Amino acid sequence: SKLRPKKPLISNINDNVLMVSRMLANKRGSASLIIGVNGGLEGIITDTDVTRRLVAKDLEAATTNVASVMTANPTVVSMDDPAMDALSTMVENHFRHLPVVDSNGAVVGVLDIAKCLNDAISKLEKAEEKSSSAAEDAVKQMASLQGAGGNQAAMLTQLLGPLMAQAFGNKSSPTLRSLLAGKPATIVSPTTTIYETAVIMAEARKAALVVENGTLVGIFGFKDMMTRAVAKELPTHFSNVDKVMTPNPESVSPDMTVVEALQVMHDNKFLNLPVCEADGTVCGLVGVMDLIYGCGGAEGWRSLFDTTMGMSASDDASEAASHYSAGSRSYRSSRTPASTKSTSNMKPVSKLRPKK
């Protein structure tokens, strides 16, 4: 499909958190841009903010103004900025979401780095399908670069593995065990209250794993908190997490590599992966951002995304004019777009498909 930005999800600065949470739940969104009384971009609120700044602080959604929970004056990028610089801004600052404006400062969308990563993997898979010989070469290269066995290498993304190894200086892909080393797991029991779970999630900035008698029985993420608890006004001190968790989640081995985990997340549209030993012992949880940071620095990701964006030039001819404003109004940002670091790669932010 042709690349084009989508309308952002918009809330008003005078809205309360309950209104915003319900809107996002209905739209299946995870972030909303907050517009001021003069139509300017005032902030951004995400599902993570709702957990950290509302539930964990024991505030009431219906009586808490969104301004006290949002991130005010967020960094923005322009549709015309080099895409690589936008991605670098997200990786270096640990941003998952980044508002996008047009040349006039009107808000046109939000970049989601997880979606950018999914798009990059999809392009690699399409390139693989078009060239069987290139895929065969990639399997051999990945087996040597990553020390993978034949079956493992064949089942891996046949282009993503070697491309990532090259982007990050031919380093072998780390395992999830190494990513989790020394990090406490965000584990709760089925009878832990939603409020207590929120405090643990807020401190670790991770989803919670629900464990009973040493066995993983559920997972509860930031979006679950917003849509299943806050939007439905559940009493967080008197509701247990087992009532709102996702039961019996899939888990992966701690010996799985980051490359393999990225592929699992892409194939299943997961944002988090529980990690368990073969005997069921819970090791912890990795999120998409953990995998991104676990691979290396921003320069490696610039190389990876640069390569994949060059694979879809035929789709770009008619997308440049397909800009949107939210509803019938044009919302503007008073923030100057993030400064670019180079002009060597002039593929614009529009190629990254800013989304709802």
Image: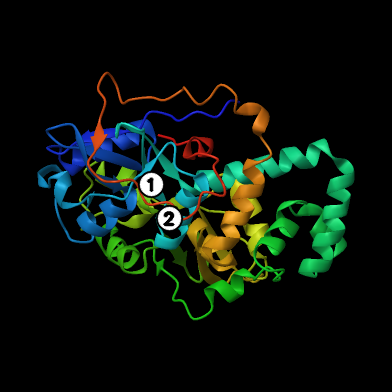
Q: Which residue is mark 1?
A: 98
C-beta proximity under 8 Å, tags 2 and 1: yes
Task: Pick the residue in front: 226 or 280.
Answer: 226
Q: CA distance from mark 2 to mark 1?
A: 9 Å
Quarter of the image where one finds residue 10? top left
As drawn, the residue found furthest toward the bottom would be 182
Q: Nearer the viewer, residue 45 or 316?
A: 316
Instruction: State which quadrant residue 347 falls in.
Output: top right
Q: Residue type at mark 2: give it.
A: Thr
Question: What amino acid is at disc 1?
Answer: Leu
Out of 78 and 153, give the one closest to the viewer: 78
Q: Position of residue 102 (x, y in %)?
A: 36, 33
305 to 16, vertically: above or below: below
Image location (x, y in percent) of residue 31: 34, 43
Mark 2 sits on what residue? 89
Q: Residue furthest front?
A: 343
> Which mark, by number, is residue 306?
none
